[in-house]
């Protein structure tokens, strides 16, 4: 296994930048998720690492080799595709043997390695079948087996779980993670599902518009999103984001809504809020850090219930604070009616503040 | 009550349509098959019986003499006929092989690569099919004279390629479009070069399309008449369609002989089509429904 380094990697089609100066390092044995909405450049980035499309600028290193101009076959990588890309006219055995055969391994070695991988993935009984005779989960395992069979330097995975049903996906998620830890494999994993990234990855690289927005451990990304995009993308339900104006009254700093309400900030948050360049901030709060009151309390802001969504162990209440809607989680026994007046209190220690103009997080 | 009658009425409606459909199909089959049947029947009649009026629907003395004569290399007639047949097989085989050899990479390139003028070139390829073949007769003849190919097999091979390739490329491109590009990418990551990925992964998957394309080229070339008539003079070079015609005007019109020869000529095409029809249908409907 090896470390992978991207240095100022660019892929552009004329004026359109699919990947815009992305730099990141995947440590040896690390599981990194490239995550973002469709069209954010994550798959393009992966294909650049694989060498399937030519790079416009920058460097990619695998181990200490610069692989910019190497063919995919010479990069010593393995890849699992979203549609598995199993060779339909070959049996499972031949599918698994293909990468070894192409590398001209002697026959007994091929057989031994294929059987080893098949045992590991529990697909020994399927070796003589063809891909179309397998279920989705089995195909997925074969695809994984074909990647495992050849101890590559890096595993690249392009949404490998998204064609599975929800239950199987959950199961494969933990299996995949366990494999990665057992093999101490370097994995670059593309997904649009932030939950997959958060649960599996050692580090996640959040991308949008071809630009790397934040690259950090999932808990860090969750706790301290670098900008408004990351804040809204990571976490479910999404963080509520409210555009507000900053106003100073004496020593206190207030956030004022154009809808008529205001909210006093703690001294620490106040100090951050006044750094906003144009006096405009975006307030971010996750559902679990907002308390819902049925009566007016000091420092709580008035709102009106839109809907409530009971999920069994937790109920999400959508509340209008003027125009913006805020999601709050409450205990399931709390009942609210649409259009009921409620008051929301923000946990000041877990508030997120972003510059209204640059969209970047305001830090101390 | 009303529901029941409505149901009956609906079923009746379907039955009428189905009946009309059957009648139409039957007429269509008769239209296609009757000439064939009459051809076969005539071919086993004697010369005299073939010209009888009213015609005999089933010959009283069926005979395979015409077939023996045609297929006997020792007889003059047989020698000539087998010569034409050999010419046809030669021209059609070369056309087919070259056609596939050109159409496969061309279709693959149109399907996989983005190059300047790709769209334009693809439509240009199809543009040929908008003109009737005769329009090209004189220009191609002049061209062949320049190339000193008049009266040579190669004039036909070149011409048939010109006409066969557009549809071949178009058919095959449809096939390649349906092979996920990830299969090749996977092969390339697994250690194959781009060319190996094409040969080892894409080619086997597109073999139905290649077979269909080959049959198509072969049949087009096998049946072609006007160009063969125009480009060839030398009797020893003639292909079957032209050969047959000359043949039988020379020796008075031997109808049973002509029919027997026509039957022999249609055999390879029919056999080929029957064996490979499933590929052909698949090639033409590929991509119609998402699998």
Image (tube, rainbow, N blue to C red):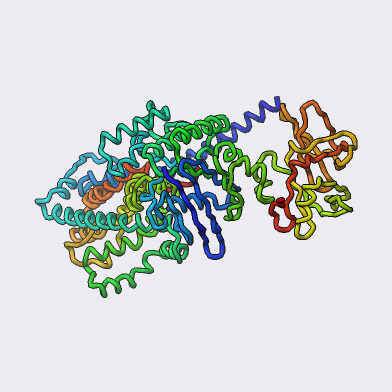
Q: Nearer the viewer, residue B270 or B104?
A: B104
The image shows residue B26, relative to residue A65, as above or below, that is: above
What is the x, y in percent for residue A116?
35, 30
Q: Residue furthest top?
A: B1
Front position in the image: B184 or A277? A277
**Residue B120 visible in rendering:** yes
- Along the viewing direction, whichever of A201 and B33 lies nearer the viewer: A201
Kindly identify the residue that appears in the image at 34 percent across and 42 percent down: A99
Residue B93 x %, y %: 25, 54
Left or right of A165? Residue A352 is: right
Counting every numbered tag in the picture gives 0
Q: Is residue B167 visible?
A: no
Q: Position of residue A348 (x, y in %)?
A: 78, 42
Percent of width and height locating residue A260: 88, 50
Residue furthest to the left in view is B74
- Quarter the N terminus of chain A occupies: top left
């Amino acid at each position: 296994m090896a470390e992978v380094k991207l240095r100022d990697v660019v892929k552009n089609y004329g004026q359109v930048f699919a990947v815009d100066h992305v730099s990141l390092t995947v440590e040896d044995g690390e599981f990194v998720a490239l995550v973002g909405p469709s069209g954010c450049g994550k798959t393009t980035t992966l294909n650049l690492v694989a060498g399937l499309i030519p790079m416009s600028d920058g460097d990619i290193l695998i181990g200490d080799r610069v692989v910019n101009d190497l063919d995919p076959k010479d990069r010593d990588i393995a890849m699992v595709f979203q549609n598995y890309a199993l060779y339909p006219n070959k049996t499972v055995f031949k599918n698994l043997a293909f990468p070894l055969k192409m590398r001209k391994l002697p026959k007994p070695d091929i057989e031994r390695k294929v059987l080893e991988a098949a045992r590991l993935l529990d697909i020994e009984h399927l070796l003589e079948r063809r891909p179309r005779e397998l279920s989705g989960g089995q195909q997925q395992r074969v695809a994984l087996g074909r990647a495992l069979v050849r101890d590559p330097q890096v595993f690249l995975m392009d949404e490998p779980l998204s064609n599975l049903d929800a239950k199987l996906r959950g199961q494969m998620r933990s299996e995949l993670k366990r494999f990665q830890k057992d093999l101490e494999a370097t994995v670059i994993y593309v997904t649009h599902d932030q939950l997959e990234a958060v649960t599996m990855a050692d580090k996640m690289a959040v991308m949008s518009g071809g630009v790397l927005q934040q690259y950090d451990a999932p808990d860090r990304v969750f706790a301290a999103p670098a900008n408004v995009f990351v804040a809204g993308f990571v976490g479910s339900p999404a963080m509520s984001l409210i555009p507000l104006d900053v106003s100073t009254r004496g020593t206190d700093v207030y956030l004022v809504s154009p809808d008529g309400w205001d909210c006093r900030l703690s001294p620490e948050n106040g100090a951050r809020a006044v750094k906003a360049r144009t006096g405009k901030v975006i307030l971010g709060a996750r559902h679990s850090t907002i308390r819902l009151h049925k009566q007016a309390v000091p420092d709580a802001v008035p709102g009106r219930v839109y809907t409530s969504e009971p999920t069994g162990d937790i109920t999400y209440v959508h509340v209008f604070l003027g125009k913006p809607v805020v999601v709050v989680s409450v205990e399931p026994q709390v009942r609210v009616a649409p259009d009921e007046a409620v008051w929301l209190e923000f946990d000041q220690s877990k508030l997120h503040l972003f510059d209204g103009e640059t969209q970047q997080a305001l830090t101390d | 009550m009303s529901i029941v009658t409505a149901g009956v009425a609906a079923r009746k409606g379907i039955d009428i349509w189905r009946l009309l459909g059957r009648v139409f199909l039957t007429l269509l089959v008769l239209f296609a098959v009757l000439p064939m049947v009459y051809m076969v029947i005539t071919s086993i009649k004697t010369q005299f019986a073939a010209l009888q009026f009213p015609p005999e629907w089933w010959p009283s003395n069926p005979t395979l003499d015409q077939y023996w004569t045609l297929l006997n290399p020792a007889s003059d007639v047989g020698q000539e006929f087998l010569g034409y047949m050999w010419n046809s097989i030669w021209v059609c085989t070369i056309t087919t092989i070259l056609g596939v050899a050109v159409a496969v990479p061309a279709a693959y390139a149109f399907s996989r690569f983005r190059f300047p003028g790709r769209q334009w070139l693809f439509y240009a390829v199809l543009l040929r099919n908008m003109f009737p073949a005769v329009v090209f007769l004189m220009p191609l003849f002049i061209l062949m004279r320049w190339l000193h190919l008049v009266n040579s097999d190669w004039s036909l091979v070149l011409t048939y390629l010109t006409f066969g390739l557009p549809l071949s490329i178009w058919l095959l491109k449809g096939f390649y479009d349906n092979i996920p590009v990830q299969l090749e990418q996977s092969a390339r990551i697994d250690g194959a070069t781009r060319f190996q990925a094409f040969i080892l992964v894409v080619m086997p998957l597109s073999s139905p399309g290649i077979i269909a394309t080959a049959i198509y080229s072969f049949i087009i070339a096998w049946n072609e008449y006007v160009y063969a008539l125009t480009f060839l003079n030398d009797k020893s070079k003639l292909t079957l369609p032209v050969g047959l015609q000359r043949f039988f005007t020379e020796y008075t019109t031997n109808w049973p002989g002509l029919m027997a020869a026509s039957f022999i000529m249609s055999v390879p095409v029919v056999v080929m089509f029957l064996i490979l029809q499933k590929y052909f249908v698949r090639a033409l409907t590929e991509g119609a429904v998402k699998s």
